[in-house]
Image (cartoon, grey):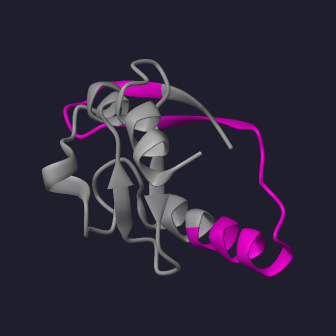
């Protein structure tokens, strides 16, 4: 699969929210389904740490630990389910991997 095909799939998948993070937890990619699910635009999120959006400091540290585990083992993590509070006061249930 080419990069163009991959990006077309990620951008055109309406029900699967996909985010990519760097090793510091900064958002590298935020697809349209993520915008719909979290109510936060890619323009707002890309380049940012998600602390204060849907992660408090404890949740963000757990994300960093997960990213480190994935990097060190090369193995996927999850799936796991979590309820994330959103800035406008609603909560979204996420099944993540």
As drawn, which residue projects farthest toward the left? 43
- Residue 45: horizontal and vertical position, in percent? 24, 56
Residue 7 vertical placement versus 21 (above, below) = above
The C terminus - image quarter: top right
- Residue 62: horizontal and vertical position, in percent? 61, 64
The foreground one among 65 and 45 is 45
The foreground one among 30 and 4 is 4
Residue 88 on the magenta segment: yes
Q: Left or right of 5: which side holds 69?
A: right
Residue 73, image quadrant: bottom right
Question: Which residue lies at the image location 31% right of the left edge and 37% below the top edge?
Answer: 86
As drawn, which residue projects farthest toward the front? 2
Residue 28 vertical placement versus 2 (above, below) = below
The foreground one among 14 and 49 is 14
Question: Which residue lies at the image location 14% right of the left edge and 52% below the top edge?
Answer: 43
Residue 33, image quadrant: top left
- Residue 17: horizontal and vertical position, in percent? 45, 33
Residue 13 vertical placement versus 70 (above, below) = above
- Residue 92: horizontal and vertical position, in percent? 44, 26
The N terminus - image quarter: top right
The span picked out in magenta is 64-92
Q: Left or right of 88: which side holds 78?
A: right
The mark total stands at 0
Question: Which residue lies at the image location 52% right of the left edge and 64% below the top edge?
Answer: 58
Residue 96 on the magenta segment: no
Question: Which residue lies at the image location 28% right of the left edge and 51% below the top edge?
Answer: 53
Q: Left or right of 68: which side holds 90?
A: left
């Amino acid at each position: 699969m080419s990069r163009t095909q991959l990006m077309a799939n990620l951008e055109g998948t309406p029900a699967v929210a996909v985010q990519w993070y760097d090793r510091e937890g900064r958002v590298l990619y935020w697809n349209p389904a993520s915008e719909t699910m979290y109510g936060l635009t890619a323009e707002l999120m890309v380049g940012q740490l998600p602390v204060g959006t849907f992660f408090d400091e404890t949740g963000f540290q757990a994300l960093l630990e997960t990213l480190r585990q994935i990097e060190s083992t090369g193995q996927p993590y999850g799936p796991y389910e979590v309820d994330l509070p959103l800035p406008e006061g609603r909560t979204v249930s996420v099944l993540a991997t």
